[in-house]
Image (cartoon, rainbow, N blue to C red):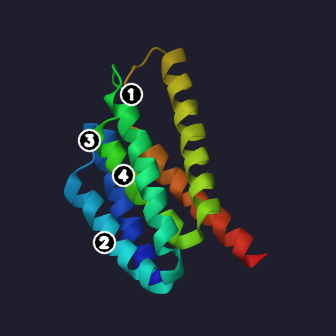
């Protein structure tokens, strides 16, 4: 689990930095996060693989529908990252971690959006960092529930 955390944390920081700077999430980094953290987690929790894959498909499909809507709601990098994070959260903590992670991501993203709109700074902002922080919150919540 520590290996997945170190690798996943490193990839997450790199993804957040790139998204903040360039408004994109590079596919090789998203794939590195998926395989580098996903394989160790799958080996540790094989009983959660089915539900984790289902979570990834559901989140990926939902985000893809949003990305295909007119306007610049989500980019395809956000779609792929969301699916990968759903998979990782599903493996790490099951459905409660997935739900907590994505609720937290949208609360964080909404707060940033309201601030940026209120200050008239910009209309487009990177959603990747909010997704990553939300996933961290989902992992923390799953760890608290498991410890209790």
The x and y percentages for residue 70 are 33, 19
Helix or strand or loop: what does disc 4 sit on?
helix
- Count the numbered circles shown: 4
Mark 4 and mark 2 residues within 8 Å of each other at the beta carbon = no
Residue 24: mark in rendering: 3
Q: Earlier in the sequence, mark 3 or mark 4?
A: 3
The x and y percentages for residue 26 are 22, 51
Q: Earlier in the sequence, mark 4 or mark 2?
A: 2
Give the residue displayed 59% in from the left and 67% down from the top. Answer: 94
Give the residue displayed 32% in from the left and 29% down from the top. Answer: 68
- Label 3 or label 4, whichever lies nearer to me, is 4
Helix or strand or loop: what does disc 1 sit on?
loop
30 horizontally vs 103: left or right: left
- Residue on which disc 1 sits: 73
- Residue on which disc 4 sits: 81
The x and y percentages for residue 53 are 43, 64
Is 139 located above or below residue 19 in the figure?
Answer: below
Mark 4 to mark 1: distance in Å?
15 Å
Mark 1 to mark 3: distance in Å?
13 Å
Residue toward you, 103 or 8: 103
Q: Quadrant of residue 72?
A: top left
Mark 2 and mark 1 residues within 8 Å of each other at the beta carbon = no
Is 138 located above or below residue 8 in the figure?
Answer: above
Mark 4 and mark 1 residues within 8 Å of each other at the beta carbon = no
Q: Earlier in the sequence, mark 2 or mark 1?
A: 2
Mark 4 to mark 2: distance in Å?
12 Å
Is 141 located above or below residue 107 in the figure?
Answer: below
Give the residue displayed 73% in from the left and 69% down from the top. Answer: 145
Badge 4 crowding class, 10 Å Cα cut-off, few under 14, some 14 to 19, many 20 or more, is: many
Q: Earlier in the sequence, mark 3 or mark 2?
A: 3
């Amino acid at each position: 689990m520590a290996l997945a955390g170190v690798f996943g944390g490193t990839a997450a920081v790199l993804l957040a930095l790139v998204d903040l700077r360039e408004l994109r999430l590079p596919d090789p980094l998203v794939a590195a996060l998926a395989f580098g953290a996903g394989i160790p987690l799958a080996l540790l929790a094989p009983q959660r693989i089915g539900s984790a894959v289902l979570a990834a498909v559901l989140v990926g499909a939902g985000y893809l529908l949003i990305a295909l809507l007119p306007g610049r709601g989500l980019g395809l990098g956000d779609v792929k990252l969301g699916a990968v994070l759903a998979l990782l959260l599903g493996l790490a903590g099951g459905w409660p971690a997935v739900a907590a992670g994505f609720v937290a991501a949208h609360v964080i993203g909404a707060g940033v959006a309201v601030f940026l709109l209120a200050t008239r700074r910009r209309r487009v902002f990177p959603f990747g960092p909010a997704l990553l922080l939300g996933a961290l919150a989902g992992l923390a919540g799953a760890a608290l529930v498991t410890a209790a």
